[in-house]
């Protein structure tokens, strides 16, 4: 069997990819997402709420049914930023094990970044990539940055920082739309973390910048003025820094009801997209980047590909 599955449970969403791997190519069978907001309030409370766990377990039950319908050779369940930080992790781990029959692997930000890099570079047209490459995976609780060589797969630098769409929103962007002082505080927070990133991965150390995850793909959809979300159009698109800055400004200026009206906007991203867009925007500003290559292939693709190598 060449069919494998990966589940990624992050701060904002839980996602599943069931895919066939043929001649090294990851071919989607099922790719779905549920916005469960597992990390809701974690930054302040230090633990998962009962409601967040219930939403996540309900999604796991749905995914268990999908896996019955599409049997796989192996499955890997990855938990990322939110799960690294909580006191009641055991309750979460046992709940997942009961529903899916696999252990929860709480991976470090460095492994998360490496898998995201692997998925991103394998999923893009090689014509879009000039080595070295910097990949940024803008998540809910953290953002991973990884520098590497797409041609060889060699990783030269990795860092993970606690800036993401949910974390920035919960820390700073409270009003609807955010007040100027809230935005200023969010910018200062993101920039302080980026200063540490620049120490690990200096400006000028790469030729191509690739952005991953829902915040980035949603910014791309808005920059291209898409009427609905279209993964095929978004994947491999190239968005300029000016476009990202314009989208970020608009998102921060508009109330949530206006964001929700966009045909491409996932309901679970409405309240946090401005925070995620801000992380992307400030990253491009810090590195003085002219453009970002947008990838729909990401951590899930990297996990599935690596599973196929084990098989």
Image: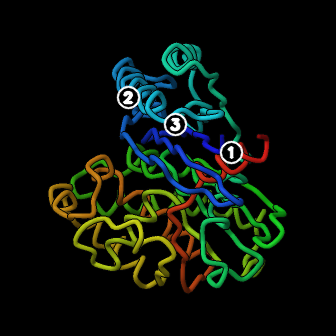
**Residue 264 rendering spot, x and y as whole percentages:** 27, 63
**Residue 129 rendering spot, x and y as whole percentages:** 67, 80
* Residue located 72% across and 46% down the image: 308
Disc 3 target residue? 9
Q: Residue furthest front?
A: 1
Whether residue 156 is visible, yes or no, is no
Q: Is residue 29 left or right of residue 161?
A: left
Q: Is residue 147 above or below residue 46?
A: below
* Residue located 76% across and 56% down the image: 158
C-alpha span from label 1 to label 3: 13 Å
Judge by depth and name the residue closer to the eye, 166 or 4.
Answer: 4
Q: Nearer the viewer, mark 2 or mark 3?
A: 2
* Residue located 56% across and 17% down the image: 97
Disc 1 target residue? 109
Judge by depth and name the residue closer to the eye, 302 or 90.
Answer: 302
**Residue 208 rendering spot, x and y as whole percentages:** 67, 79
């Amino acid at each position: 069997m060449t069919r494998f599955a990966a589940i990624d449970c992050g701060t904002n969403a839980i996602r599943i990819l069931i895919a066939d791997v043929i001649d090294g190519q990851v071919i989607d069978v099922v790719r779905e997402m549920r916005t469960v907001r597992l990390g809701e309030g974690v930054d302040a409370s230090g633990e998962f709420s009962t409601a967040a766990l219930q939403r996540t377990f309900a999604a796991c039950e749905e995914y268990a049914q999908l896996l019955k319908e599409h049997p796989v050779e192996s499955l890997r369940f990855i938990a990322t930023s939110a799960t690294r930080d909580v006191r009641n992790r055991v309750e979460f781990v046992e709940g997942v094990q009961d529903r899916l029959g696999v252990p929860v692997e709480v991976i470090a930000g460095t492994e998360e970044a490496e898998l995201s890099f692997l998925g991103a570079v394998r999923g893009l047209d090689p014509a879009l990539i000039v080595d070295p490459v910097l990949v940024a995976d803008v998540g809910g609780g953290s953002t991973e940055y990884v520098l590497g060589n797409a041609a060889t797969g060699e990783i030269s630098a990795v860092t993970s920082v606690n800036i993401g769409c949910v974390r920035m929103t919960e820390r700073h962007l409270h009003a609807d739309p955010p007040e100027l002082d809230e935005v200023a505080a969010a910018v200062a927070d993101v920039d302080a973390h980026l200063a540490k990133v620049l120490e690990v991965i200096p400006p000028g150390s790469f030729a191509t910048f690739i952005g991953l995850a829902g915040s980035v793909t949603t910014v791309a959809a808005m920059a291209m003025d898409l009427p609905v979300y279209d993964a095929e159009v978004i994947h491999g698109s190239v968005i300029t820094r000016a476009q990202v800055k314009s989208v970020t400004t608009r998102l921060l200026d508009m109330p949530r009801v206006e964001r929700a009206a966009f045909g491409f906007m996932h309901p679970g991203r409405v309240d946090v997209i401005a925070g995620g867009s801000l992380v992307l925007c400030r990253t491009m500003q810090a590195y003085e980047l002219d453009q970002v290559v947008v990838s729909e292939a990401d951590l899930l693709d990297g996990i599935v590909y690596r599973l196929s190598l084990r098989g």
